[in-house]
Amino acid sequence: MVAVRQTGEAHSSVTQSKNPVSAVGAVTIRPAIIASHAPCAAGFSIHPADEIAASAVAKLYMPMVASDDRADQRVRTVARLAEPLRHRLYDFVVSRDAPTSREQAAAAAGISRSLAAYHLDTLVEDGLLVTSYARTSGRTGPGAGRTAKLYRRSSAEVVVSVPARDYELAASLLADAVEHDPTGAVRSALNERAHRAGTEATHQPPVSGAPSAVPARSTVHQALATRGYEPNDDADGTIRMRNCPFHRLVADHRDLICEMNLSLVTGILESLGDHDHRAILDPRPGYCCVAVIPSAASSRP
């Protein structure tokens, strides 16, 4: 419950405080437990003399409450993912092209099916995984067996920032500005700077959310994984990335971001002195728009 009281100087009467103070306009709002105040529709407890001021505050505070609830949920999700076994299972599921069964996850982690199911369903509850049902035996019709519950990564993104930051809005505004430059000079400068950042990337710390322990693979794989790309090999030797670190921007600025990505990955390859691979634009559903192919393949028709 929240007590709102306004006198010559805005303040609150608080008997028990649990959450940080929020200020809206000239009125300070604090969580409190006050039995003598009449309840209002927004969930506050407000002294009758303060009804006019509280009405305005309630209209402003209600979206703040919803926002705070979403922030709390994001914090809980990240905190629960910190459990080592659960994180291992999540990494295993998202590393696979096909949906994962409980049996497959349990075998990979060396745990029981029931324990794997508990952690996987927790990840679904937190919105990090989604489920589907299918027969895994390869057979159909009578006698084919029951359908299995399968897990794959969801499209949801979880970002926690303390204090609150909105770098995505800044990036979107900057992308808009680049696209509206009639000369194309800013776009060229962006790609040039992305290429330079790529050449410096192997000397920078991993991006937030990248795996803490990259599997022992080629230097190219390690460099891409450290930057959050989640590289995976095709049968023909093409390296495709399951994750685009700039995915949220791609929806509204696809060409711009894909060109920037290409310049960045090209710079990473150059920084490694790798002449056996070449970055190209080859967008496919579920993958980054950039692929890394063997240099010999780049000359194929």
Image (cartoon, rainbow, N blue to C red):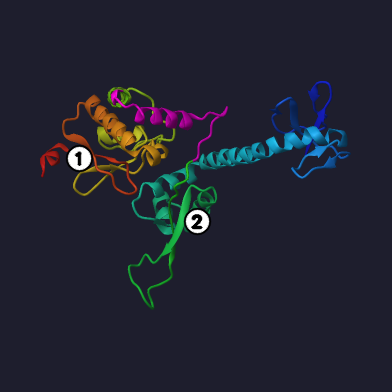
Q: Is residue 23 above or below residue 232?
A: above
Decide: is 55 above or below 140: above
Q: How would you rate the neighbour count of disc 2 (Cα within 10 Å): few for under 14, some for 14-19, many for 20 or more?
A: some
Report the label total.
2
139 sits to left or right of 2: left
Name the residue: 46% across, 57% down. 131
Q: Indicate the position of residue 127 as horizontal and vertical percent values.
A: 51, 48
State the extent of the magenta-drawn residues as a range. 158-185
Say left or right for 285 vs 21. left
Place of residue 157 in the rendered image (x, y in percent of width and height, measured from the top left): 47, 42
Question: How far is the residue under mark 1 from the one under mark 2?
Answer: 37 Å
Image quarter where the N terminus lies is top right
The residue nearer to you, when weighing 237 against 172, is 172
Give the image quarter of residue 133: bottom left
Nearer-the-camera pick, 245 or 143: 245
Name the residue at 57% across, 38% down.
75
Q: Specify the amino acid type for callout 1.
A: Ile
Point out the residue furthest to the right here: 36
Amino acid at the residue labelled 2: Ala
The tag on residue 293 is 1
Neighbor class of circle 1 (other Cα within 10 Å; few <14, some 14-19, many 20+) is many
Name the quadrant containing residue 4.
top right
**Is residue 213 a member of the stretch shown in magenta?**
no
Q: Earlier in the sequence, mark 1 or mark 2?
A: 2
To which quarter of the image does residue 189 belong? top left
Q: Label 2: state its secondary structure.
A: helix
Q: Which residue is mark 2?
A: 117
